[in-house]
Image (tube, rainbow, N blue to C red):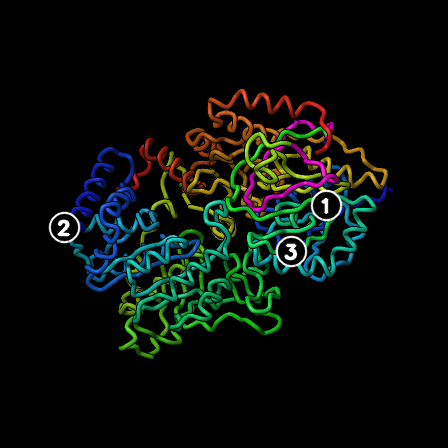
Amino acid sequence: MAPKQKTFTVGWLYPDLMNIYGDRGNILTLLKRAEWRDYDARMLELGRGATKGMEDVDVFFFGGGQDREQALVYEDLLEHKQPPLERAVRSGAVVLAVCGGYQLLGHYYQTAEGERFPGIGLIDVRTEAGKKRFIGDVIVDIDTEMPGLVPRTLVGFENHSGRTFLGPEAAPMGRVRLGFGNNGSDGTEGCLQDGVVGTYLHGSLLPKNPHLADRLIRSALRRRGDDELSPLDDSAELSAHERILERAQRRLPARAPQERELRSSAAAEPREPS
Amino acid sequence: MMRRTAAVLAGKATGMLSRLSRRGGGTTLPGDVARAIDPDVLRKLARDLKFGSVVITGTNGKTTTARLISWLLEGAGHRVVSNRAGANLIFGATAAALESAGADGRLRADWGVFEIDEASLPKAVDEIQPKAVIVLNLFRDQLDRYGELESIAKRIESALERLPAGSRALLNADDPRVAEIGLDLPAPPLWLGIEDTSVAERDLPHAADARTCPRCGASLIFDAVYVGHDGVYRCPNKDFTRPAADITATNIQLDGFDNIAMTVGMRRAYSADRATETQAVKPDQRLELPLGGLYNCYNALAAYAAGVTIGLEPQYIAERLKNFRAAFGRQERMEFRGRHLNLVLSKNPAGFNETLRTAVDLAKGNSFLIALNDRKADGTDVSWIWDVDFERLKGKATVLVPAGSRAHDLAVRFKYAGIDAAPPEPDPGRALDALVKATPEGETAHLLTTYTAMLDLRAELVRRGWAKPYWET
């Protein structure tokens, strides 16, 4: 008799409200990549009021929403999701939070008028509203916080006006080679803290960054003592990734190459988390 | 007067030069030039129109609906000014008016039919002072360019609040976000809606927006889903529900990309001029027209409603629609080495899901080229392809060519949808070759493409002599 198939569960926080930037691509990527490794991959929808099954989730996904939807999510997050989510992370589950989800997991979001909306403080980041909206392609050179990831870049698209700043507990995922990232001023993009990955990259993020997708799956499975993932053929994903890098190279102004070289060599050196 | 004449002449000269130099149809630049000389030029030209204007807005279907209304008016002997080529910003509308103006700077036409981008609507309504404004739907589209649905909806609302007396808003009752716009308007709108559950889908697509009640925030319950998030919906707390439709489409028949047929009923009838408003209910009218897909039922319903509102007879409308020809690239047929090519614009999740549904389920298509570009007019953010239900092609598409500048992203999308596809081919010529080579003679290939990818493919088709340049269509 065949051994019982192992399950892999993706928990999608507010799939009907926080799904603005093609976030389904991240869900599909996690599910398929587990399925291709013979896991019984399942998706658990965690809409408003739902908490059932959160303890079985391996990877949570929390996407971005429009302002109207984000306001509806906010109360439910504090009331229903915060305690089970904290418990899950403590037990080794992984969270990927993009854009609005990223902001809501931090300490607070401060509006242009100075009003503060507290987040759930799962990660040591704070966000302030900015005037200019950051919109466009992003290329990130991955920091040493994530060793072993190949290629050493992440590609995606950003569209946000929030400026997110990392506290001492959180480390950036990397430095922006193209685009604005966390706040447009310190060159960082994303955050890593315990099992939580926060980022402004959509596009969707995971389909063109299969190395990051596998890192999330592997970290989540580690608590089950099951972190060996068989290799997959990622040529389609990586050639889409490569196309973005090539195009950016062509588009960057001719006067910038020196600066680019400096940046990429800086990113390759070991660095303390900032 | 001098200033206006100068503006008109400068604009007209720009249009002529632009066409002569083959830089395209001269569809917006003349508007730019004329408005720089006289910012009020459109307002002045619109006042010259003998009967007035109809303005069409919404995410999907603007071009086809505008073309349908122009077709109806022209058939009734009216001279119509229309921004035909999908140039739907205020500059495009201005350019269209310029083209029809005489050397004295006067516009000699009976009606204006303008499709207007959602964001430009307040300005357009203010300048054009239309008799009727149609709001077709509000779907997510190019968030990088237009911003969130909510702010677009607010702009449309502010435009409709300022409609001149005697002007009528025609709103899609099936779209919850459009319905919300109509709730508090000073003048009651005319509501349009489909009432035929035989063409409904069971579930909301992934890309559905506007799923919450505007009053209490509860998730809406959908009893039927027609297109995107357009359907029959209600708030579980009874705070909000689909408005009762004044003009309905029932008994719908869909025949691939070839035909739609439906019965249009009027529960209430209005004329645009409320002084002579009649409550006379017109008898049901059967409409048949050579367009494909349920989404075109909404466009036809809107055109019918607009036609009746501005005084056309239902029977005339039905007769005239039978011979309608689709707008360029919206749905175009051409022959290519014994293959039938069907070119369909598909520019956002809601639109794409409908063209896929039509091509796969209704037209039984199995040969496809899907083209995705990320230029400004397409939206530079391509993440929306993950909201399109390409899974519908699984087991149906025997030929699938990913094309456009982001062909590689499509290839990944198809991989995760579990569909076998040809290698990504960003070059339009080579993509066409791959499609034709793989499509057996006598078969139909469906080309579903974003806006500039369609222009690229079309340019290649024109170069090869299989399609006419767009300023000649």
Is residue B183 highlighted in magenta?
A: no
- Picture disc at residue A123: 1
Q: Position of residue B221 (x, y in %)?
A: 60, 66
Residue A117 is labelled as 3
Instruction: Name, please, the residue furthest toward the bottom.
Output: B279
Q: Is residue A203 left or right of residue B261?
A: right
Residue B22, quarter of picture: top left
Output the chain of dot 2.
Answer: B
Instruction: Kindly indicate the quadrant of the structure image that contains residue B13.
Output: top left
Q: Which residues are magenta?
A: A145-174
Determine the secondary structure under disc 2: helix
Task: Tell me whether circle 3 and circle 2 mark residues in contact (CB < 8 Å).
Answer: no
Q: Earlier in the sequence, mark 1 or mark 3?
A: 3
Q: Residue at x 44, y 61 (%)?
A: B253
Q: Is residue A35 left or right of residue B122?
A: right
Locate the C terminus of chain B by quadrant. top left
